[in-house]
Amino acid sequence: MMLTSLALSTVLLFGESVSASPPNVLFILADDLGWNDVSWHNPEVISPNLDRLAREGFILENHYVQPTCGPSRTALMTGYYPIFTGGQFVPTQELEPVGLPTKFKLMPQYLKEAGYSTHLAGKWHLGYCCPEYQPTNRGFDSFRGLWGGAGDHNNHVTNADPREPITSAGYDFHSDEETNFSVIGKDTSTIIGDRFTEILSERAGLRKRFFRGYPKGPVHMKNYNTSNPFFMYAAFQDVHKPLMVDSHYEDMYPEESDPDRKTLLGMVSRLDATVGRMVEDLDRFSYLSHEGENRTLLQDTVIIFSSDNGGLSPGMGFTGGASNFPLKGRKGDTLEGGCKVPAFIYNSGRTGVTDELFHISDWLPTIVSGMAGIGDLPEDLNGVNQIQLITTESGKSGREEILYDMANFENTNHTLYVGGDRYFDLTGAFGAALRFQDFKLLLGCSTLLECARNMNESMGGNADNNRIELYNLVKDPVESNNLAEDLQYAEILEDLMIRLLSYRDQAAPPLHGEYDPSGLPANHFPPGLFHSGWCDPIQNPFLPYPKNLE
């Protein structure tokens, strides 16, 4: 696979002239993929399709996200740090009667204004308890996937209440607003690949043949409409727990002795195989341009890849199988291992590797304004339009500062249940992290365990809300040398502290609510299904909460 010729049109597309048609966008979001779980960081990982896209594209080595999945998806879809949506630090759980507040306009809503068709396949995790929160009411023309945050990869059953994993189990897979039983027994990655084939085939006017599916092989499209590009958000469930994959993927790693690691690596290879199918699909659909050039959809498509947070590496009693080596920390942490993730963009006009700063919130203005040409975005977005960085050889990042996240639970009661009798009581906790240029400030708790007030200090919990750490990430990327007590960095520390506390003063309270039994799958007819319509939508996270929220 060679770098396609979209780069030639990006000078017009991303510069002052927007006469060329906007590109298709395929956004691939992996789930819980660690820094050391990709082949361009670790040659033991077998992912040839992702590796080829990364090495022929533009690798973002300082790409940051939030420490957990729901907050990262919030930042991606809104362009705001989650502290401004109420979705900070930890995601909402299935029985909480909340979702991403409806005041926020999401990326697909903007893109539809530019003539895009918009599709989501995979994991949503931004609320489903009322129709207003669901993907097809937030700008997506179609949705096929799970509403919640996790579940069995093949049978798509998950527990709505982690305290009662058996009695609260229910089926969570949907096509648009309707339950979809046709995918039982098929893993989510395969479903995403199949759905992508279906979308491209439908755009080409192909008919699905009984029992045989859509035609295979090269497809030349007549009268192809380049003014109707697509945005495909492929939100993979791999490599999120439960760790499960067909044995032939595990067999690709005969030297791996850790069974969890072996399964997770197999899940990476499964994800990679689906990405390979998607790229092949893009390459087999072609059309004749107005200039008489035979072009493929791959030439017209920008592919973006990222993980939603760091990997769940061993720790806190979990054996997640992931690796963030050599970074410190894991999923749930504002340490580098929780928020610095593998990412790249393919076919944007620039190749190579960069250490320039990039945050997941930057993708909304970069795609919506930089690629689609929509200029009317809110002035208070936290995301930065990074189009110059990704298209020109001399391009620099538009940001110097990144807020990792903030656990501002000092005035909020919240308990995060993680299974059985295990839980993290976050009530009263405060923790936040901010990077400015080369330096990083951590204030208060920096890991989920440290923020837990039900864990004593000997267990690694209940960290002091006023604890201060300062690191030079350029010289010390593994956060081993705390400079907070070194007087020569006093001015830098003071500057970062002012910046961080300014965010604290502006932040919305975390948007959480007591578990509502109305959402239990057993309370649906027929029973056993995840369902909607049991909460009222929240419009603004800064307004007083409904009576069922504290």
Image (cartoon, rainbow, N blue to C red):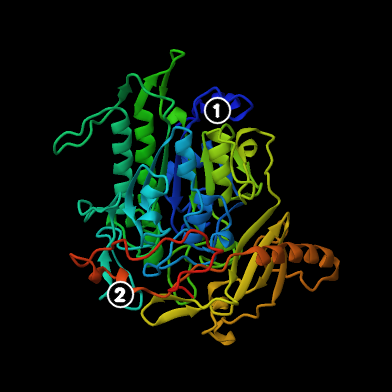
In-front residue for pair 249/22: 22
Label ID, residue 165: 2
Q: Amino acid at mark 1?
A: Ala
**Which residue shows up at 37% across the image and 21% down it?**
287
Q: Is residue 346 above or below residue 466?
A: above
- Provide residue 427's location: percent of width, then percent of height: 54, 79
Q: Secondary structure at mark 2?
A: loop
**Quarter assignment of residue 123:** bottom left
Q: Is residue 63 above or below residue 466?
A: above
**Which residue shows up at 58% across the image and 77% down it?**
411
In contact (CB < 8 Å): disc 1 and disc 2: no
In-front residue for pair 440/380: 380
Label 1, label 2: how many angstroms apart (C-alpha)? 50 Å
Callout 2 crowding tier (Cα within 10 Å): few <14, some 14–19, many ≥20: some
**Quarter assignment of residue 208:** top left
Q: Is 504 left or right of 526, judged from the image as shown?
A: right
- Provide residue 406's location: percent of width, then percent of height: 60, 66
- Provide residue 135's location: percent of width, then percent of height: 38, 50
- Provide residue 209's location: percent of width, then percent of height: 17, 33
Q: Quadrant of the N terminus?
A: top left
**Which label lies toward us, 1 or 2?**
2
**Which residue shows up at 48% across the image and 31% down it?**
23
| Residue ID for mark 1 | 7
The earlier-in-sequence mark between 1 and 2 is 1
**Which residue shows up at 62% across the image and 64% down it?**
507
Residue 57 showing in the rendered view: yes
Q: Amino acid at mark 2?
A: Pro
